[in-house]
Image: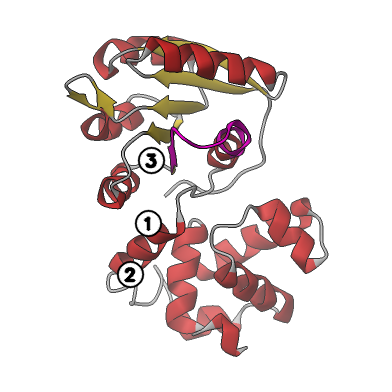
């Protein structure tokens, strides 16, 4: 799983959508947020997009799932295999099972085409950071599905021993993240009274100690070994 990282601007964005009007609007929206982000290419189908993506080297790929007969969902693994970009699915489909399938296939986020422009821009930034960006229902379903597989101790060590290695401050951070699994790190840092940079430094230490690779794995591990965060 991809882990959170410090953003580097501009965020380079490639668009795959077969609706010219949507693509035009996305390009204008991205331009409006310069210099934080820039559109570096577009395509109406996944096959023709691959060489363009390899040339453009985008950071984030905005991907429609319904591409006029081609499934964007089935193309996600190949797109990830042939590029280093992170994928944000932009879709008009409201089926949460499809959204869940997109995340399982490797996308880091799903957002509806009806979302406000500011929400889409924030989703792009979060996915670029490596943060899971999906609605609460899909998050809960993913966590429920992952829990049986992640119930064992983490790679290379005992869960209880790993938890014992955390400092009191690190435990506080973990429980705060458990209560707010979808909130951006900047907001989490504010609730903790620390800077986002300080929070990311703590997270690096926490991930290493618990041998997890991101917030979703941290949530599953912590649910098993720390229990209900509201009880602490």
| Residue 158 in view here | no
| Residue at point 28%, 19% (across, down) | 46
Q: Which of marks 3 and 1 is nearer the N terminus?
A: 3
| Residue at point 33%, 24% (across, down) | 82
Instruction: Verify CB contact (< 8 Å) between mark 1 and mark 2.
Output: no
Q: Residue 182 carries which label?
A: none
| Residue 114 located left or right of residue 128 | left
Which residues, given as a range, are shown in magenta?
A: 110-122
Helix, strand or loop at label 1? It is helix
Q: Earlier in the sequence, mark 1 or mark 2?
A: 1
| Residue at point 58%, 72% (across, down) | 179
Percent coordinates x, y for residue 18 in the rendering: 32, 15
Cα separation, mark 3 vs mark 1, equals 13 Å
- The residue pinned by badge 3 equals 107
Mark 1 Cα shell of 10 Å, populated few (<14), some (14-19), many (≥20): many
| Residue 215 located left or right of residue 70 | right
Percent coordinates x, y for residue 119 in the rendering: 59, 39
Percent coordinates x, y for residue 177 in the rendering: 60, 67
Can you say which quadrant of the picture contains the C terminus?
Answer: bottom right
- The residue pinned by badge 1 equals 138
């Amino acid at each position: 799983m991809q882990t959170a990282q410090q953003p580097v601007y501009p965020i380079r964005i490639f668009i795959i959508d077969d609706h010219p009007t949507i693509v035009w609007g996305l390009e204008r929206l991205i331009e409006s947020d310069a210099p934080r982000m820039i559109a570096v290419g577009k395509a109406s189908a996944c096959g023709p997009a691959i060489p363009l993506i390899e040339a453009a080297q985008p950071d984030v790929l905005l991907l429609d799932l319904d591409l006029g007969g081609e499934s964007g969902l089935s193309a996600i693994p190949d797109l990830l295999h042939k590029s280093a970009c992170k994928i944000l699915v932009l879709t008009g489909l409201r089926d949460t099972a499809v959204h869940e399938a997109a995340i399982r296939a490797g996308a880091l986020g799903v957002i509806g085409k009806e979302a406000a422009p500011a929400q889409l821009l924030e989703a792009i930034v979060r996915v670029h950071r490596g943060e899971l960006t999906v609605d609460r229902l899909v998050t809960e379903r993913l966590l429920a599905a992952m829990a049986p597989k992640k119930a064992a101790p983490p790679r290379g060590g005992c869960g209880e021993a790993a938890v014992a290695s955390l400092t009191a401050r690190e435990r506080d951070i973990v429980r705060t993240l458990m209560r707010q699994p979808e909130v951006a790190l900047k907001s989490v840092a504010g609730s903790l009274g620390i800077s986002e940079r300080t929070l990311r430094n703590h997270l690096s230490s926490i991930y290493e100690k618990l041998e997890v690779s991101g917030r979703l794995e941290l949530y599953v591990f912590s649910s098993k070994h720390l229990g209900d965060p509201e009880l602490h």
